[in-house]
Image (cartoon, rainbow, N blue to C red):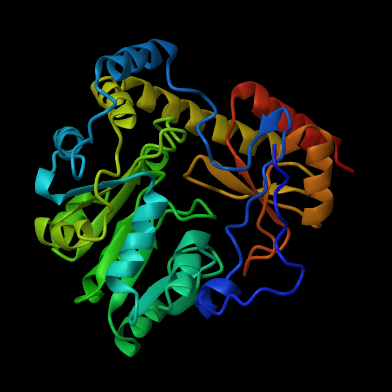
Amino acid sequence: MTPQTPFPARVPDLSGVRGAVREVPAYPFTPIDVPHKLDQNENPYDFPADLKRLATERMLARPWNRYPDLHAETLAARIAAFEDWDPAGVVLTPGSNLLIKLLTELGGIGQTVLTVSPTFSVYTLEAQMLGANLVQVPLNPDFSLPVEGLKAALRDNPPGVLYVTQPHAPTGFVDAQAAVRELVEAADGWVVVLDEAYYQYSGTDSRPLVREGANRLSLRTFSKAWGLAGIRLGYALTSPTLAEHLRKLVPAFNIGVLAEAALEVALENPGYVQERAQEVRRERGRIQAALQDHPLWQVLPSQANFYLLRTPDAEAAYRHLLDHGIVVRRQDRLPGLTGCLRVAVGTPAENDALIAAARAFR
């Protein structure tokens, strides 16, 4: 092999890269290889083996040399049937993170992205990189929505995108429906995104609220309860009018036939999703009960497939768990989350390992 020519040692002139992109840090994640991976809110179980075989058979039967649907219309129709939604109001991308980027392009550039603090980091990263006016209102001390503060921000800023996450990330909190409705109804003229990535674990459903306004959108994913994070598919449920505008920003042919085959099989066999969500709820309660008398660590209430573990020293707690083969996510640098780690609900065996490690901490 011919040796590669190294880049010059001098500092490169990258003035062609927008300053907002240069200044924003990369997405904050570094993979760590340990036996118990509880740091990414994943489903701890793989797609069922029999369904994986069926999906593989369908993949092999389809031509790979032809472009897929322009905007995954066939799959969108299947999702619409599953969700009882108008197919014209379904928009698909490879992962809901991409939809967040496109929603920021749709309503945030030169306008406003409004959310709470702390919040899902992708909202803020995309807003900052795309030069939106980012406005964050601190959560209430109990992690509930600061409805009055958000309503004031809606009045005081030019319209754009409002993100309302139910259950909330990273706290797992679910607000009263009356509070969510009050906020959504105050956001006239805004693009209102109800991010429901974890709704199967909380039993909540914002579709009725979304149906009441053409400016509203439910953001959902196959990465969590469906156990298909490796396939990468997120989707929006919204009005045909808003979907038409959003679809203008979606790259053509962005869902391949391989992902399409896997997702068709999943939609035809959704029973496993509810079974696994029920197990998560049982395990979440078991973990909280097992650690309720811990002298130093506290499991905070959650309705998602993760929970916050509050400790006196997040660094020491994180290292202790890592020494026991468990990786979690530090959240202690976020406002209002001093000492907190975010922990995904794993398999019963993984949760046993977490409980044992927590009890061993002194």
Closer to us: 8 or 287: 8
Residue at 41%, 44% (x, y): give it: 198
Residue placed at 36% from the left, 16% from the top? 56
Residue 74 visible, this orientation? yes
State which quarter of the image contains the N terminus: top right
Q: Position of residue 81 (x, y in %)?
A: 14, 34
Q: Residue at x 37, y 21 (%)?
A: 272
Q: Quadrant of residue 286?
A: top right
Q: Position of residue 116 (x, y in %)?
A: 46, 70
Establish if 176 lies above or below 36: below
Residue extending furthest toward the bottom: 156
Quadrant location of the C terminus? top right
* In the image, farthest residue toward the right: 362
Q: Quadrant of residue 153?
A: bottom left
Q: Quick check: 337 left or right of 212?
A: right
In the displayed structure image, the side of residue 234 where residue 290 appears, left or right: right
Q: Position of residue 107 (x, y in %)?
A: 29, 72
Up-down relation of residue 183 to residue 257 (above or below)? below
Q: Is residue 86 visible?
A: no
- Could you tell whether 256 is left or right of 240 in the image? right
The relative height of residue 351 versus residue 310 in the rendered view (above or below) is above
Q: Indicate whether 104 appears above or below 33.
A: below
* 224, 288: nearer the viewer: 224
Q: Residue 46, position in %: x, y?
A: 49, 23
